[in-house]
Image (spheres, rainbow, N blue to C red):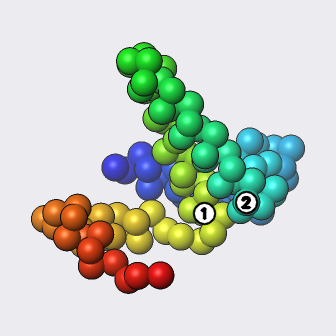
Amino acid sequence: MDILRELETVIAARKGADPDSSWTAKLLSKGPEKCAEKFGEEAIEAIIAAAKNDRENLTYEAADVLYHMLVMLGARDVALDDVLGELARRQGLSGIAEKAARPKG
């Protein structure tokens, strides 16, 4: 888990960096919508790898998904600890009970 926190710190540091200096800075400079779009693309690639039972590519794509998720969260100022806190809150709840408890809307 420490690697995700370290990656989150690097992503935050790239927020104001020159877009020509890093892929992360370039992606962040395009705005939160582009960051979300890129996350979606990577998620689809991971789904395809899983459907094809391509373990090696799924591992690679899953790493891309985690990275791009952190970029997307950073673009909207959502901390990894907030997401982890939500997962901790749900721990021990059945998925059915958790979904039923969500606000309707």
Compared to 1, does 65 lie above or below? Answer: above
Left or right of 96: which side holds 40?
right
- Image position of 25 with respect to 54: above or below: below
Residue shown at 73%/60% (left/top)? 33
Quick check: 100 left or right of 56?
left
Q: Is residue 31 left or right of residue 77?
A: right
Q: Quadrant of residue 55?
A: top left
Q: How many angstroms separate mark 1 from mark 2 (CA)?
A: 12 Å
Say which quarter of the image contains residue 20: top right
Can you give x and y, in whole percent of width and height, for residue 3 in the image? 42, 46
Q: Is label 1 or label 2 in front?
A: 2
Q: Nearer the viewer, residue 56 or 8?
A: 56
Which numbered disc covers residue 33? 2
Circle 2 Cα neighbour tier, 10 Å, few/some/many (<14 / 14–19 / ≥20): few
Q: Earlier in the sequence, mark 1 or mark 2?
A: 2
Q: Which mark is on residue 65?
A: none
Amino acid bearing label 1: Gly
Disc 1 designates what residue?
74
Image label count: 2
Residue displayed at 63% across by 69% down: 76
**Residue plotted at (61% across, 57% down):** 72
